[in-house]
Image (cartoon, rainbow, N blue to C red):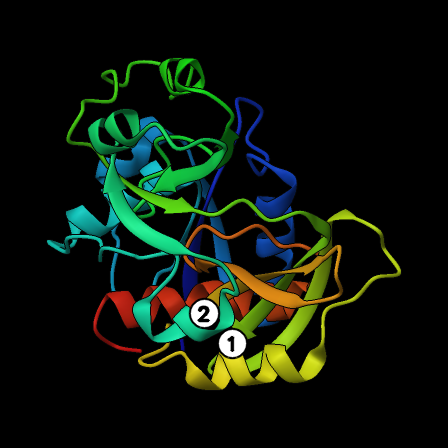
Amino acid sequence: MNSRTAYVLSDAEGKAYSANGAVAAQGFKHLGYTVRYFTREELPQLDILWDTPVVAGVGTVVKALKQLGIEPPAHQTLPAVLTPFLGRRCWRSTIGDIRREGVFPIFLKPFEDTKRFTGFVAQREADIDAIPTHEGDEPLTPDYVVLAQEPVNFRSEWRTFVLRGRVVGTALHTGDPLLFPNAQIIRQTVAAYEPPLAGYSADFGVTDDGRTLLIEINEGYSLGSGHLKANQYADLLRSRWEEMTGNG
């Protein structure tokens, strides 16, 4: 029986494009896959199927899905069903409305996980003009939709990895490594996320007054490995890939 194939993006030397790619390659081998490295230029020639996970950055995975005729699903980093776990005001707005209202400081990020820019706290209107976007992106227009939040001071921020509804790992993102979120709140948040993705991460922060708050939900198909075991990481990527291709 032929083994299954997992495609991993490579660098100019034919090695995994990143540390995450190297962990994924190791994990897929443990799961019985044949790992094939590819360059971005080779992507159109790959025999991509529902059961051939593609490990790469967001843009490359999106192109791979489109080769299968699949439009990547829109992803909200803070689904409405999880509002009770935010602990702060959070609303949908636009760049134009934020300018007109002029209420600062304010935390801003893309409303959908488009990766146009990284979430940040705007202290004044001039900070909006300086939002860093990816090279080649068009400037943000007044009707560009953002997620606006009341700023919160987190003393530590943690990422939890969720595979098929179960937390399989955690990793410190920033802050005090001895200040861990309330585990019961993490469990409650994961249980409340409906319908859940097959693989994703949920980020939590501990505030300076000791509260554990949800920061955001992250798509699983191009997620970093954190400190997951290689086979767990590969399983998470595989599960989300097969879900997106209709076979999860």
Residue that protrudes farthest toward the left in the picture: 69
For the N terminus, which image quadrant? bottom left
Name the residue type under label 2: Gly
User: With 7 as the anchor, is 67 left or right in this view?
Assistant: left
The tally of labels here is: 2
* x and y, in percent, of residue 130 in the image: 42, 14
Which of the two residues, 2 or 194, is positioned nearer the viewer here?
A: 194
Q: Which mark is residue 153?
A: none
User: With 110 as the anchor, is 165 left or right in this view?
Assistant: right
Name the residue type under label 1: Leu
Which of the two residues, 81 or 41, is positioned nearer the viewer here?
A: 81
The CA distance from mark 1 to mark 2 is 5 Å
Q: Quadrant of residue 204?
A: bottom right
Q: Earlier in the sequence, mark 1 or mark 2?
A: 1
Q: Is residue 184 visible?
A: yes
Q: Mark 1 Cα within 10 Å, few/some/many (few <14, many 20+)?
A: many
| Residue at 59% in and 65% down | 213
Give the labeled residue for mark 1.
163
For the C terminus, which image quadrant? bottom left
* x and y, in percent, of residue 149 in the image: 43, 47
Q: Is residue 3 visible?
A: no
| Residue at 28% in and 31% down | 101
Q: Quadrant of residue 229?
A: bottom right
Give the labeled residue for mark 2.
199
* x and y, in percent, of residue 66 in the image: 17, 47
Which of the two residues, 208 or 6, is positioned nearer the viewer here?
A: 208
